[in-house]
Image (spheres, helix red, strand yellow):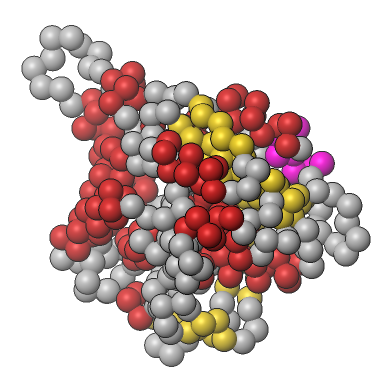
Amino acid sequence: MTRHEYIHEGTFEFEAGGSIEGLRVVYHCSDRLWQKGDERKVIWICHALTANSDAQDWWPELVGPGRLFDTEKYFVICANMLGSAYGSSGPASINPATGEPYYFDFPKVTVRDIVRANDLVRRHLGITRIHLMVGGSIGGFQSVEWTIMEPELFEKAVFIACGARVTPWLTAWEESQRLALEADPTFRECASLRGGEAGLRCARSIALISYRSYEGYNATQWEADEDCLFADRAGSYQRYQGKKLSDRFDAYSYYYLSDSVNSNNVGRGRGGVAAALAGIKAECTVIGIDSDRLFPVQEQKLIAQAVPGAVYHEITSKFGHDGFLLENDQLTAIIAPLL
């Protein structure tokens, strides 16, 4: 997939207030660009919290030449979320008024803002029909929201391991991660984008526990030495994953995206969740993961029951919420017939 940038001419207004000029959205798409009259089916992928727009990078078993989402056969596209650390406008972007990163001067971001930014890219490219929309986790938030905002745009949609409205359970997990960022005294100093790095590592450790499961950790993190005095393999894994994220992401983008999770409510201003979901016209497939503790399957079942004609599938995984990135064979079996 090839990287591109879209820069919006004019003012972008944010749902919670505030605006910026020259909104930037980075996106990756099939190497052969979309042109007017193109007959390829469009597959739009919405990525999860700390992923990027190069879906072939983080979903390599499903995206690429000859894969389920064949980048040579279809026009496959993924846009980097507004507020992310991978090039789209966000708190790490340079504020033209100061010449420094925005930090906390960047407007608060909602899921609807992210979708509207994505839709600007879609309009810029001249795409008038999306054959298949796919999103997991917060990418699922975007997918559900977008099919409600633009019901005539989508032919089919796949919502994976997500919910239609943020739950107190999810809010508590997200707030715990933001508390970890706040506990790092360098975070609020806004002296550099390395601020809050230790807090970000801790936040990632908290998040990982919510993404995985008892069975998943026990399947992969037992000590090699049964007689070891102190178990430390799982602890070492947590530290490794925390550093891995802090090496590629910044705490400010993480804070903003985590906060955007709390805005997820497709029923806001639409008469409630059920009424909003009932307005979806796409042929929808909803996929839950049996071991997902972050988004238990009742959340996906609720979506499937409220969307007209939706079909629900449940996959089996030891790895909780992260199963949507790992159970490729099961996902392929469900999604392939849609193409």
Q: Where is residue 9 in the image (x, y as percent from the top left)?
A: 65, 84
* Numbered range of the magenta stretch: 65-73
Which residue extends farthest top?
Answer: 226
Residue 234 falls left or right of residue 11: left
Q: Where is residue 101 in the image (x, y as percent from the top left)?
A: 39, 76
**Residue 253 vertical placement versus 158 (above, below):** below
- How many dots with numbers? 0
**Residue 277 vertical placement versus 328 (above, below):** below
Q: Residue, x 25% and y 13% (percent of image)?
A: 224
Return the residue nearer the eye: 282 or 44.
282
**Residue 102 vertical placement versus 63 (above, below):** below
Residue 257 in sight here: no
For the C terminus, which image quadrant? top right
> Could you say which quadrant of the image residue 310 lies in?
top right
Return the residue nearer the eye: 209 or 311.
311
> Could you say which quadrant of the image residue 296 lies in?
top left
Residue 93 in sight here: yes
Q: Residue, x 24% and y 52% (percent of image)?
A: 172
Q: Position of residue 38 (x, y in %)?
A: 88, 56
Q: Position of residue 285 (x, y in %)?
A: 62, 40
Which residue extends farthest left?
Answer: 229
Residue 4 falls left or right of residue 75: left
- Residue 67 lies in magenta, yes or no? yes
Predominant SS along the magenta part: loop
Q: Residue, x 36% and y 61% (percent of image)?
A: 262
Q: Residue, x 51% and y 27% (percent of image)?
A: 315
- Residue 26 lies in magenta, yes or no? no
Residue 280 falls left or right of residue 142: right
**Residue 151 vertical placement versus 240 (above, below):** below
